[in-house]
Amino acid sequence: EIVLTQSPGTLSLSPGERATLSCRASQSVSNNYLAWYQQKPGQAPRLLIYGASSRATGIPDRFSGSGSGTDFTLTISRLEPEDFAVYYCQQYGSSPRTFGQGTKVEIK
Amino acid sequence: QITLKESGPTLVKPTQTLTLTCTFSGFSLSTSGVNVGWIRQPPGKALEWLAFICWDNDTRYSPSLKSRLTITKDTSKNQVVLTMTNMDPVDTATYYCTRAGSGLPNDYWGQGTLVTVSS
């Protein structure tokens, strides 16, 4: 089972700032099948990024993903008020399709 | 338009069996490469992947819960059913039904259903 470790646990930033979230895997993620999801309170998660760097349909280009193998990054270039949420990474290259523990991006 | 919706009890007693149904539309589970699965989230905690069933009836389970889970599908009804035996208060969570696929992430999610385990 691949363990995903996200850091930091909480990121305190102001609107307009750049957010950099990390996801590290305990072993190489097959085919770089790494996804990022955004979750707001009371809502289901929403797919942002798949295949480590491809944006899902309708996702603004301020969201970008990068990385390969065991180290992945989600970058939000300029935080908008609606971007303050919890972000999860997930690997779907092997079963079980594990999630990280999440990073909360909060308003400073 | 793709939608998924979970249904089932909101309250179960410890040791009981939970049965959740996912009813979906806008796609077919007989399409090659498609799967439908379940993910849960205890209150205030992280997402936990549980299981999925594939278009060809292949199934995968979380190793830690495999002995308690069964996932089945009824393609004609566009439904997927998850059963979890021997429920415990630690199983209290919102349970989500999602669509994914071979080499594809969870792109569509249901709204989730909160299941509370309490006597």
Image: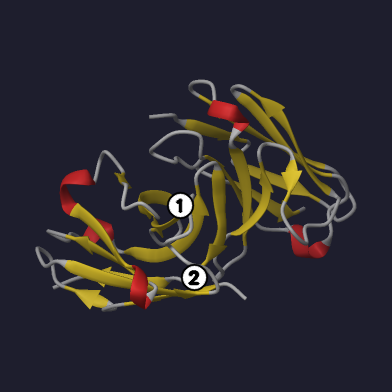
Q: Residue at x 61, y 22 (%)?
A: A69
Q: Earlier in the sequence, mark 1 or mark 2?
A: 1
- Give the side of residue A47 with respect to residue B81, left or right: right
Helix, strand or loop at label 2? It is loop
Q: Callout 2: few (<14), some (14-19), or many (20+) C-alpha neighbours within 10 Å?
A: many
Q: Specify the label residue B1 is tagged with.
A: none
Image quarter hosting the N terminus of chain B: bottom right
- Give the side of residue B115 with respect to residue A36, left or right: left
Q: Position of residue B70 (x, y in %)?
A: 21, 56
Q: Residue at x 18, y 59 (%)?
A: B88
How much space separates mark 1 and mark 2, taking CA atoms?
14 Å
Residue A67's image quarter?
A: top right
Helix, strand or loop at label 1? It is loop
Residue A23's image quarter?
A: top right
Q: Nearer the viewer, residue B60 or A48?
A: B60
Q: Position of residue A63 (x, y in %)?
A: 80, 48
Q: Nearer the viewer, residue B83 or A84?
A: B83
Q: Are marks 1 and 2 on the same chain?
A: yes
Image quarter hosting the C terminus of chain B: bottom left
Q: Position of residue A107 (x, y in %)?
A: 75, 56
- Give the side of residue A10 with respect to residue B56, left or right: right
Q: Amino acid at mark 2?
A: Gly
Q: Specify the label residue B47 is tagged with.
A: 1
- Tell me the residue that label 2 is attached to: B110
Of tags 1 and 2, the one toward the viewer is 2
